[in-house]
Image: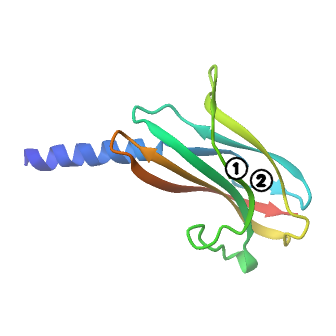
Amino acid sequence: MKFFSVFAFLAASAATAYSQTIELGYPTDGTVLSPGETVEAQVVRPNSIIGCTEVGIALAINSCPDGECTPPSSALGNVLYAGPFTPTAHVGDGYYQNFTVTIPDYLDEGSAIFTLTHLCLLGAGAYPLLEYRNASVTVA
C-alpha cells in the first residue's frame, strides 16, 4: 500500500511539473482576430522547480472548417513564428516573451485555433518534452 501512495504522489508531482512548463498568455479563448491584423502574442513560462532547457517554439493559426479543428499534432496550419524562446523575468508577472505576428490575409473567416508548440529538454536527464497550448479564436 505504501508503494502505491508513493507512486501516486510522484505521478501527481510529475504531472504538475509538466503542466507548468509553458502557457499561451495571448490570444486567449474567444479572441476575435482579423485577416491582416498584427497581433502581439504572449508566451508565458511559469516558475517551476524542474529545469527546462528551451529548444524553441512555433506559433500558428489554422482555420476550423465547419467548426472542426485539426489537432495541432496532425497539422499546425499557417506558421506565424518558428524559432527561439528566450523569456525574460518581469517583476510580479513571472517570465514571458511577446512575439509580433500577422494574421494571414487569406485566412478563412470563422472558427480557428491559435496554437503554441513548445519543445524543451526537461530535467537533468534531458527528457524531450513536446507540448501544445491552444486558444479557440474567431477570424472576422
Residue at (77% x, 53% y) in the render: 31
Position of 87 with respect to 19 (left or right) is right
Residue at (70% x, 50% y) in the render: 28
Q: Image height check: is 131 above or below 74?
A: above
Residue 93 in percent (x, y) is at: 63, 26
Residue 98 in percent (x, y) is at: 73, 39
Residue at (31% x, 46% y) in the render: 12
Mark seen at residue 31: 2
Q: Nearer the viewer, residue 19 or 97?
A: 97
Residue 139 in percent (x, y) is at: 83, 63
Q: CA distance from mark 2 to mark 1?
A: 6 Å
Few, some or many C-alpha atoms within 10 Å of disc 1 (few <14, some 14-19, many ≥20)?
some
Name the quadrant containing residue 62: bottom right
Position of 85 with respect to 105 (left or right) is left
Mark seen at residue 28: 1
Name the quadrant containing residue 51: top left
Position of 17 with respect to 62 (left or right) is left
Position of 101 with respect to 9 (left or right) is right
Amino acid under label 1? Thr
Q: Nearer the viewer, residue 7 or 97?
A: 97
Mark seen at residue 110: none
Q: Secondary structure at mark 1?
A: loop
Amino acid under label 2? Thr
Q: Secondary structure at mark 2?
A: loop
Residue at (40% x, 36% y) in the render: 50
> Extreme bottom residue here?
66
Residue 128 in percent (x, y) is at: 43, 53
Contact (CB < 8 A) between labels 2 and 1?
A: yes
> Extreme left residue here?
1
